[in-house]
Amino acid sequence: MTIHTTHPFADADPDPARRFRSHVSGAVTLWTAGDDVERAGLTVTSLMVALGPEPTVLALLDPDSDLLEVLRETGTAIVQLLSWPDRQLAEAFAGTAPAPGGPFRQAAFVDTDHGPRLASSATWAGVRLTGEREVGWSVEVAAVVEHVEVGETDDPLLHRRGRFHRHQA
């Protein structure tokens, strides 16, 4: 047994992909891709972050979604974590709530090299599509993490058993 001078499970993990992964468990994410001419987005909860030399996000996407089509065209996307106040936005991008003018009109977005990013999102990753395969009724996409921002996520939006939940500390 070795005694360390630092805590082995300290919060300040220097690996940004590992820090990103710790935030996505059970979290509701919004995937967005495209540009001013054509953009698409989709609320996604079925994902995981695989660590390694090229950290990769694996996600299950609807094969009929506009997002998958635009992701295939551009090859890049933004994966952003939503927070409790974003519940209506999550419903709009899931296609389960009205979104007059489209879901991108429901909040402010910032254009990036990887696609449109929700301006209020503190934790997000820019990803590049590297592969896909059919899994059940979904398409599993693999996207290498190229950029990560990890900010304060005090009130993450969680989705379990068909309902939104708040994180219980």
Image: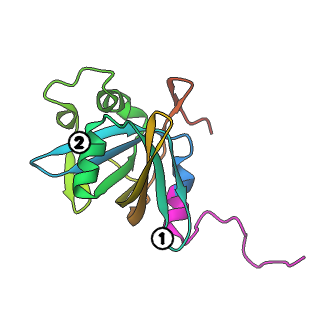
Query: x%, y% of residue 62?
Result: 38, 36
Query: x%, y% of residue 166?
Result: 53, 32
Distance of label 2 from label 1 (alpha carbons): 25 Å
On the rendered image, what quadrant is the C terminus found in?
A: top right
Q: Residue at x 44, y 49 (%)?
A: 133
Secondary structure category for the residue under label 1: loop
Residue matched to label 2: 40
Apparent side of residue 35 relative to residue 21 in the rendered image (left or right): left
Q: Is residue 126 visible?
A: yes
Residue matched to label 1: 54
Q: Which residues are magenta?
A: 1-20
Q: Residue at x 33, y 38 (%)?
A: 42
153 vs 144, nearest the viewer: 144
Q: Residue at x 50, y 23 (%)?
A: 163
| Mark 2 surroundings: few (<14), some (14-19) or many (≥20) residues within 10 A | many
Q: Is residue 109 magenta?
A: no
Apparent side of residue 53 relative to residue 68 in the rendered image (left or right): right
Q: Based on the displayed image, in which of its 4 quarters is residue 22 positioned?
A: bottom right
Q: Is residue 5 magenta?
A: yes
The kind of residue tagged 2 is Ala
65 vs 34, nearest the viewer: 65
The kind of residue tagged 1 is Glu
